[in-house]
Image: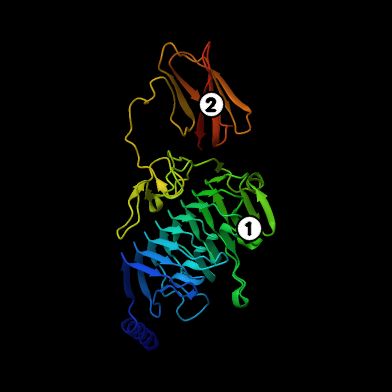
């Protein structure tokens, strides 16, 4: 009993001597034109610290080092002192000219449960890095960030349970300029360690490459343990998207054959431009990840010294960082001539022919390979089409035919 009492008194004394520091850095500008090596903006972490780094602007040109150093490179006494840190709503711009730079832009090594949301990273050589010697992240997330033209976008190195949700990653670089991927997952072997990265989850992201830069690279088989990747959109202007496991390159179809991205699509998100990355319309291809992650960047979000505007997911989840606000429900479809709704459809959908002189007689549904998967006669203005249980979730083409009418084509998303 005496020993227990002494232990309690020592613990309380430790809390008094080393209380948790509350550190909020918000609405600041950090501009550094140093072109050599720079440690960047360094977060003090000698004591346990509750850090919120929010709505700041960072512009650096360093050939090596860091932009935001909010963690450790190696095991040490300061590890875990920034557990639970929040880095949100910041803009990171790298203006360096050294093409082979690996400047670490948002570095949070050896801390767990880190939240990285609503940030915009532009030309950052090594974008967001999560690193440790085998720590397990249980409540952190990398979500609703826009990462433009990194040499490597997100790195998971020797840390387990990292969640990567609803980000937009874009690259117009060439494989010759970066042999890395938009997302790299690998073992931390620094200093003789052997810490694989297990349990990475990648959902609801948009990957857009102009050249055949790698989308995802899992370096070792050990990192495939509990690895999940699905409900993403991929697009490459130069051909089929590319993936890699170890030293083996994989096409999208080969990647899917391994069981990954079985509900994902290779489609052009049709961004309004390559600066704001706003899709021209809702991209309703996502997986519902729960209320904890349902607040994304609004389509009109901007980065300043206040938090960027946000919007909430609704019953049909969208992919990518930008989210269209839910439109109020309407009693009738807006299209006054021909309309197929709801889209996405689950179990059934409706075909409305709202013009007596334009009544289609036949419906045909094609899969992505052009095969007919169902056909149904139509009768009158409103028809209900029931989907058979054998039709899997995915993107389909619907064709309507009628006497002396031009065929009507549209895309239909079917969900589970």
315 and 324: which is toward the camera: 324
Give the percent coordinates (x, y) of residue 175: 62, 56
Residue 398, numbered label: 2
Give the percent coordinates (x, y) of residue 348: 48, 28
Give the percent coordinates (x, y) of residue 395: 54, 35
3 and 156: which is toward the camera: 156
11 and 329: which is toward the camera: 329
The color scheme shown is: rainbow
Element assignment for label 1: loop
* CA neighbours of label 1 inside 10 A, class few (<14), some (14 to 19), many (20+): few
Q: Quadrant of residue 139?
A: bottom left
354 and 29: which is toward the camera: 29
Whether 355 is drawn above or below 416: the answer is: above
Q: Residue at x 64, y 48 (%)?
A: 255
* CA neighbours of label 2 inside 10 A, class few (<14), some (14 to 19), many (20+): some
- Residue where numbered disc 1 is placed: 176
Whether 109 is drawn above or below 328: the answer is: below
């Amino acid at each position: 009993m005496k020993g227990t009492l002494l232990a309690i008194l020592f613990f309380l004394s430790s809390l008094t001597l080393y209380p948790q520091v509350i550190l909020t850095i918000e609405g600041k500008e950090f501009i550094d034109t140093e072109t050599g090596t720079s440690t960047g903006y360094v977060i003090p972490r000698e004591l346990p610290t509750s850090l919120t780094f929010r709505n700041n602007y960072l512009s650096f040109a360093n050939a090596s080092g860091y932009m935001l150093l909010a963690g450790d490179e190696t095991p040490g006494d300061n590890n875990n002192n920034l557990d639970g840190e929040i880095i949100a709503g910041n803009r990171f711009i790298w203006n360096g000219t050294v093409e082979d730079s690996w400047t670490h832009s948002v570095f949070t090594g050896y801390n767990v449960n880190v939240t990285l949301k609503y940030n915009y990273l532009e030309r950052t050589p090594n974008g967001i890095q999560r690193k440790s010697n085998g720590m397990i992240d249980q409540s952190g997330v990398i979500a609703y960030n826009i990462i433009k033209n990194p040499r490597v976008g997100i790195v998971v190195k020797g840390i387990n349970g990292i969640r990567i949700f609803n980000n937009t990653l874009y690259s117009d670089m060439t494989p010759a300029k970066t042999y890395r991927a938009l997302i790299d997952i690998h073992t931390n072997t620094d200093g003789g360690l052997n810490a694989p990265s297990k349990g990475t989850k990648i959902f609801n992201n948009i990957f857009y490459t102009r050249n055949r830069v790698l989308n995802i690279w899992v370096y070792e088989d050990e990192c495939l343990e509990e690895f999940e990747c699905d409900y993403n959109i991929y697009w490459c202007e130069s051909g089929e998207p590319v993936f890699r496991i170890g030293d083996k390159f994989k096409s999208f179809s080969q990647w899917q054959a391994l069981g990954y991205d079985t509900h994902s699509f290779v489609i052009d998100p049709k961004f309004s431009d390559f600066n704001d990355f706003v899709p021209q319309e809702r991209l309703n291809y996502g997986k519902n990840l729960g209320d904890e992650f349902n607040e994304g960047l609004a389509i009109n979000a901007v980065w300043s010294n206040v938090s960027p505007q946000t919007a909430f997911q609704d019953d049909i989840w969208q992919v990518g960082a930008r989210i269209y606000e839910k439109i109020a429900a309407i009693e009738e479809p807006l299209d006054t001539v021909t309309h197929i709704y709801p889209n996405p459809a689950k179990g059934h959908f409706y075909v409305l022919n709202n013009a007596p002189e334009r009544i289609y007689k036949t419906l045909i549904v094609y899969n992505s390979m052009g095969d007919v998967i169902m056909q149904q006669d139509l009768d009158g203005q409103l028809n209900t089409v029931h989907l058979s249980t054998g039709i899997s979730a995915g993107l389909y083409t619907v064709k309507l035919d009628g006497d002396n009418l031009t065929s009507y084509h549209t895309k239909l998303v079917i969900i589970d």
